[in-house]
Image (cartoon, grey):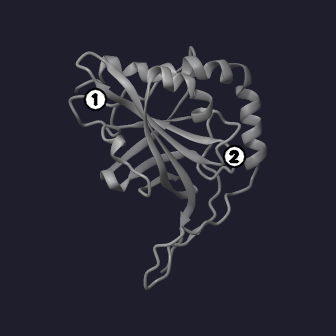
């Protein structure tokens, strides 16, 4: 079985910068998320526009829960989600490139505060769940499934960051003192034949659980 590119590990380097925030404050950030979420659920959301015979899509509340599956319909990708942690100020995606990793110190789908951070490897020979992450654009939908239900997100922005830029924006992109429950997806990009030079980051706003019209 093909292993992830050896050079894919620089993805974890954003932890070197993020670490200066999280190592000292992760407990406080977790408490903050707990206070904001604390048995609460996200409000109900309605996607603006898109009227059809049945009316605009409806979304309902969902309770916070650890993610177990990621679905990106635009990319025709569904991937198992496994919990990952930060070690030595680095966040390392699952070694199985068919899986993606949820940083357990980040928000859960359904939390009102913080940001849900999910990452995975890109493999230059193909086949990894995150290989085509950069093809997501504003307006595309992403589902994160937990035992509490399906949280749907709408992509707002996809951007490529150099390693230096990612470190510079680490707190903005991965800090847990803001974000209002948004989803952050990240992987490597720009393979130069030896290593990946950049990272692609997708930011998506929570809509809620798709309502059952049946």
Q: Quadrant of the N terminus?
A: top left
Residue 65 in the image: x percent, y percent?
60, 49
Location of mark 1 (residue) = 123
Q: How many labels, in total?
A: 2
Residue 118 in the image: x percent, y percent?
49, 38
Choose between 192 and 143: the one closer to the eye: 192
Residue 35 in the image: x percent, y percent?
79, 44
Query: Which quadrant would residue 116 be assigned to in this image?
Result: top right
Q: Residue at x 50, y 76 (%)?
A: 56
Query: Which quadrant would residue 33 be assigned to in this image?
Result: top right
Secondary element under disc 2, as helix, strand or loop, is loop
Residue 62 in the image: x percent, y percent?
62, 60
Residue 74 in sight here:
yes
Location of mark 2 (residue) = 113
Choose between 199 and 153: the one closer to the eye: 199
Q: Using the image, determine if residue 71 lies above or below residue 20.
A: below
Q: Using the image, determine if residue 46 lies above or below residue 192.
A: below
Q: Residue at x 71, y 37 (%)?
A: 177
Q: Is residue 149 left or right of residue 38?
A: left
Q: Earlier in the sequence, mark 2 or mark 1?
A: 2
Secondary element under disc 1, as helix, strand or loop, is loop
């Amino acid at each position: 079985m093909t292993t992830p590119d050896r050079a894919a590990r620089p993805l974890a380097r954003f932890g070197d910068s993020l670490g200066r925030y999280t190592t000292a404050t992760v407990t406080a950030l977790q408490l903050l998320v707990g206070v904001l979420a604390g048995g609460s659920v996200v409000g109900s959301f309605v996607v603006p526009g898109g009227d059809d015979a049945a009316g605009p899509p409806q979304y309902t509340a969902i309770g916070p829960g650890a993610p177990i599956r990621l679905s990106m319909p635009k990319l025709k990708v569904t991937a198992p989600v496994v919990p990952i942690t930060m070690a030595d100020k680095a966040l390392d995606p699952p070694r199985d490139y068919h899986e993606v990793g949820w940083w357990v110190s980040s928000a859960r789908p359904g939390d009102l505060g913080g940001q849900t951070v999910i990452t995975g490897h890109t493999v230059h020979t193909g086949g990894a769940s995150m290989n085509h992450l950069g093809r997501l654009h504003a307006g595309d939908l992403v589902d994160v499934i937990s035992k509490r239900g399906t949280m749907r997100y709408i992509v707002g922005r996809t951007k490529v960051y150099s390693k230096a830029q990612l470190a510079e924006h680490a707190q903005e992109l991965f800090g847990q003192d803001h974000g209002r429950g948004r989803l952050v997806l990240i992987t490597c990009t720009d393979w130069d034949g030896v290593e990946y030079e950049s990272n692609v980051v997708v930011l998506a706003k929570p809509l809620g659980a798709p309502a059952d019209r049946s």
